[in-house]
Image (spheres, rainbow, N blue to C red):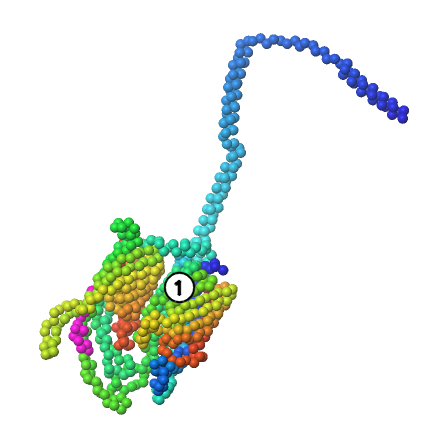
Amino acid sequence: MITASLSAGELEIYSEYGSYNISYEDENQITGHKTGTNRYSIPTDMITLGAWYKSSFDEDYNEVWGIGIVNNKIFETFQEVYGGKTVEQNKKDILVPYIFIGKDCHYWALEVGVSWYFTTEVRPERRYLDEVDTGKESWGLTRSESHTIPNFEIRILPKDWFHIKLFMSRGEFSPIDSLLGINFTLPRKKLVYALEVSLLLPKQYLYDDLEQLKSNQRIKFSLAYNGKSFKAGGSLGILIKNGVTGKGSIGFLNTLSLGTNISLKW
Amino acid sequence: MKKLLMLFVILSISLFAEDTKKEDVKTVVTPIKTTEVKKDASSDKKEALTTDQKEKKEEKKEEVKKDAKKPNYSFFKKKTEKKTEKKTEKTVVTKRKTRKKEIKKSTIRHNSYFVTKKKKKEKSLSEQLSWLGKKGLRKDGFLVFGGMHQHLYTYTDRRYSGYDQGDYIKSQAFLLGLEYWQTDLSSVVPSFKDVKFGSTFAFYNRAEFKSRKLDAIDYTEWGTDYHIDEETVPDDKDEAAGHSWINIGFFAGIDKKWLAFDLGLTLSVSMYDEKTREYKDGTTREGRGYTYDDDKTIYPNLHIRLGREESAHFVFNVLREDYDPIYGVINMYVYFPMSSFFSLAVGGYTYQTDAIFIQPALKFGNFKTALKLGTVINYQDNHLEKVGIADTLFANLSVKYEW
């Protein structure tokens, strides 16, 4: 079982469908201001599409390199919640291209690189207060929500055996739901079982700033069929904590996400 | 019966007769006339010969003994022949194998992605971890760099609608820097073969911000009339004055094959050109010229390389290499050597701005020239959401010489 060799190349394409929950505070509610139980969420559709490619370029030293790109589309929504107050979400697109290099030995692997987190939104045209509102909208880069971050993936134990991966902006990640996380994988004969737990970013534990990079926290179960030169499977995710938009009660179905993935090896 | 008896009698008679013949034959030994051998000279010669013969015989015996000691060529020859034959066979076989390998290598397609890889013997965990201590390239060198970009002064303009009320004034900024390092300090301390020591210097200057006048406006919102007075930004002349920063630092670290780690300190001093001084009574006086700011700080500097220096590797810098003293204090990149004379680095800044850049480089002997081109994604400033793309571009040119 423990005889895996470094594959020459690997390509994976994955997708995910879930909900992006926008939380708001019901100011009409008297109770719950201190505990936060007066906060609610409204959902909107969110689709994630990603692909990555990894290849070995020096077999003698087990060196690898790779590139990847992930696109997260959040659909717009507009809802009147109470007393004329509306909660809205503009169309939002998060694009994360990344590049990495590393060393993939049998018992462990360390890959590091750079990721660029671009957030684009549909925004109304900026005008002076004494000017007429034309109502025009356009796509624009939301600089306060765009970042340059390091990415890494650390694998402990052989790939063909039970192994643990600590990752940031790598693998089958979602920029909103699982930017940083731990993955436990158990390959067993032709099937591969995986459990992924995404973590909040370190800054989220220290303070809450609108412009800082944030991630949700969720658990994802994956099952894949591992063929000779390909792997195909699906996943089911459950949102645990809404770290991006904040605390707010969410319906159970709006916490679920479904995903598929297919990878080719040669 | 009678016949049998007669036969028996005949047989017994014949036997008796032979016996009698033997008994009857008496050997008569007649004396043999022997001739006496006279001792002549010839007989002496015979004796001499015999001694010679004896000597020869002895010599022959000795030779036989020697021959016996010597390897029996007839017997051992085969074995040695076999050995040599085996050796020659072996050398022929190894030559054939190496030749086959050479042929295989030359015929393997360069697109190795589609070639099935043979499983190689896996190294043990201790063998895999032993690479940590391997020596690096141990090079000395210096790096000279310079660059330019627009430096933005940000402010809040309440005249804009919505939450995006940030705006900016730009001024030209340029930077210059120098870094020197020396590896292999074994001449100082014998065990410091992989130790690196160096110093870094950077100068950054931004021109004066030209003041901007914001007009007064009147507007109506939710049925109420509002008025905003005229403003001038920046309102503080010292803030608008040209500023310069000088960073001087030193560092020390280790430079191994797979890992380089440098740590040091950098003193950052800022100055501004005070042209005038204004007082409450409305009078102005001549400024003091270049004056130190209170903004003097000592920062740590850091350089981490993961991967082989001659191959693709990842670098993380804090106030090191060809950094931007204001916009690119913390930067990181992935380096790819494309060929012996061309390489490409792709990376970004993470503090004080978030940026993306690419850095192609040409190598001529010990010289390496690199051009860094990039754009700022996020100014990490609450005021700035909309910035013109041309105002976010930056360029750096660096020349490195290593020996």
Of A86 and A250, the residue lying toward us: A250
Q: Position of residue B229 (x, y in %)?
A: 19, 84
The quadrant of the rendering that contains the N terminus of chain B is top right
Answer above or below: position of A171 versus B131.
Answer: below
Secondary element under disc 1, as helix, strand or loop, is: strand
Answer above or below: position of B331 versus A46.
Answer: above
Q: What is the residue that sits farthest to the right in this orientation?
A: B2
Q: Which residue is mark 1?
A: A154
Image: magenta residue range: B233-246
Q: Position of residue A207 (x, y in %)?
A: 31, 74
* Mark 1 crowdedness (10 Å alpha carbons): few <14, some 14-19, many ≥20: some
Q: Residue at x 35, y 71 (%)?
A: A201
Q: Is residue A188 magenta?
A: no
Report the side of B37 relative to B225 (left or right).
right
Question: In this orientation, does residue B401 appear?
Answer: no
Q: Residue at x 11, y 78 (%)?
A: B280
User: Quadrant of residue B372 in the image?
Assistant: bottom left
Q: Amino acid at mark 1?
A: Ile
Q: Chain of mark 1?
A: A
Q: Residue at x 17, y 69 (%)?
A: B293
Answer above or below: position of B103 versus B35.
Answer: below
Q: Position of residue B210 (x, y in %)?
A: 18, 75
Q: Is residue B245 magenta?
A: yes
Question: In this orientation, does residue A225 appear?
Answer: yes
